[in-house]
Amino acid sequence: MRPERGANVGRITRRGFVAGTAGALGGLIAAGGAGAADRAGTPPPTGPGAAPSPAFGRVRSDTDPERDFRGVWLASVANRDWPSRPGLSAAAQRAELLGHLDTAAERRLNAVVFQVRPTADALWDSPYEPWSQWLTGVQGQDPGWDPLGTAVEEAHRRGLALHAWFNPYRVANHTDPTRLVPTHPARVHPDWVVPYGGKLYYDPGLPEVRHFVQDAMLDAVRRYDVDGVHWDDYFYPYPVAGRSFGDDAAYARYGAHFEDRAAWRRDNIDLLVRETGARIKEIRPRVRFGISPFGVWRNEASDPRGSATKAGAQTYDDLHADTRMWVREGLVDYICPQLYWNIGLAAADYAVLVPWWDEVARGTGVDLYIGEALYKAGDPAQPAAWQDPAELSRHLTLARRYASVRGHCFFAAKEVAEDHIGAMARVVADHYTSRAGGA
C-alpha cells in the first residue's frame, strides 16, 4: 500500500513505501459534507459490555448505503501522514491529529484506521514496547501526551470509529539492533530477531514471539475504547531476490511435522490470527478484528480457486498468509484487500478482483471492505486511468453490484486532505451524499 513509481502489479503496498522499501519492489512487479461541529457528542461508555461506537460499518443494504464502512488509513511510520515530522510539540502534534479527524468527518467518512504500532513501538504508554521514534525523533522518549487516547476520544466525538492499526512483526527499518533503545525486547531477546532485506523482523516461527506480539498489541485493546484491531499486509516479509529469511533454527525446532517450510510458516501466521481473534473477544467482545492484505491471494495459474490475475506477489505463497481461508473460516470480522489497481489493468484488474473477493466472502459473515489507492490519483507515474478524477468513483459504482462489499477504505489521510485532482471530492459527491450512519 505505497505510492510507488512505475508498474504496479507486484508488491504494491503502501506500507512498503512508508518503510522505505522502494528497492525491493522491482523484482516483484509482474507487468507492470457534514463538518465536525454537528458530529460532536459525548464519547461512548467503555468496557466489554459497552455499546458500539457511532460508526461501526457492519450493516449495509442497497437502500442504506450510509451504513457502509467509509474509512481512511492514517499512517505514522516514517511520518507518512502524521505527525508531519518528528519532534513537534505535543500541542502541534495534537492539532495535526485533530485536523485529520476533522477532514475525515468533513468528507463524510465514518472510520479512521490509525497506525499505533508501526515498528515494534507504541503511540501509547505501553509496558511492552518503547514510545515510537516517529513522535519525538527519539525512540522511547515520552511525547508528553497520549496520542492513542486522544485519537479514540476525539474520533468518537466526531462520530468516527477508531480502528487501531498494528504491524505484528516489523521491528525496524534498518538492521542495526544497537539503534534500538537498550530495553527494547529485540535487544533483550536477540534470538527473536531476523535481519532481512535491510530491516529487522521478529521471527514468526517462535511461539514466545507470537505470544509477545499479541500481548503488546492487546494492551491497547484492554486500555482504550478502540472499535477495531487492524493489521496490514506484512506477515512474513515480502521476498527479496537472492535472499532467504533466516528461520532455520525455528524450523528445525518446530517444523518437523509439516510437509515443508511454507506449510509451517502458514501455520504460524494462522495461529497468530486465530489466537488474536479469540483474545480480542475475551477482552472486549464488540471490538472488530480486520486485516488488510495484498489484494491477490493466488493467481489462477497457481491455484484454480485463485483470481484471473498475473500479479507478481501472492499472499499465500510469498507472505505465507492464507487470506482466503481466514475469510472462509470466519477468523476475522472483516477483510479489506488492497485492490490498488485500476479498472481494466490486464495483470490485476479491479473489475476482476472485486467479484473474486465477493465470492470468497459470500455467506461467511465476514464483511468485505475494499482498500482504495487514492494516493495514485493524479500521480503522473501511474497509468492513464489514474489521471481521471472519476476513476475511484467508478470503483465504488462497480463494487456496489456485489452484496458482500460493505464499504471502502482510502489510502491515505494525507491524500484525503490534499486531494490533488479532486478524486476524493468526486467520491464524496457521487457516493457519500449523506452523513454516514452507525451500525
Image (cartoon, rainbow, N blue to C red):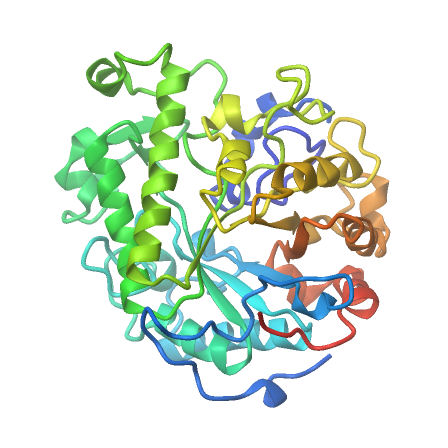
Residue pictured at 79% horizontal, 65% vertical = 431
Seen from the viewer's position, the closer of residues 348 and 57 is 57
Q: Position of residue 84 (x, y in %)?
A: 50, 64
Looking at the image, can residue 60 be seen? Answer: yes
Q: Position of residue 347 (x, y in %)?
A: 75, 26
In the rendered structure, the answer to whether residue 70 lies left or right of residue 44 reads right
Residue pictured at 47% horizontal, 72% vertical = 52
Rendered-image quadrant of the C terminus: bottom right
Looking at the image, can residue 196 be seen? Answer: no
Q: Is residue 275 above or below residue 115?
A: above
Q: Is residue 240 above or below residue 237?
A: above
Snapshot quadrant of residue 218? bottom left
Residue pictured at 68% horizontal, 73% vertical = 108
Seen from the viewer's position, the closer of residues 380 and 328 is 328
Q: Position of residue 381 (x, y in %)?
A: 75, 40
In the rendered structure, the answer to whether residue 165 lies left or right of residue 120 reads right
Snapshot quadrant of residue 422? bottom right
In the rendered structure, the answer to whether residue 319 lies left or right of residue 108 reads left
Outermost residue, front side = 363
Residue pictured at 54% horizontal, 73% vertical = 160
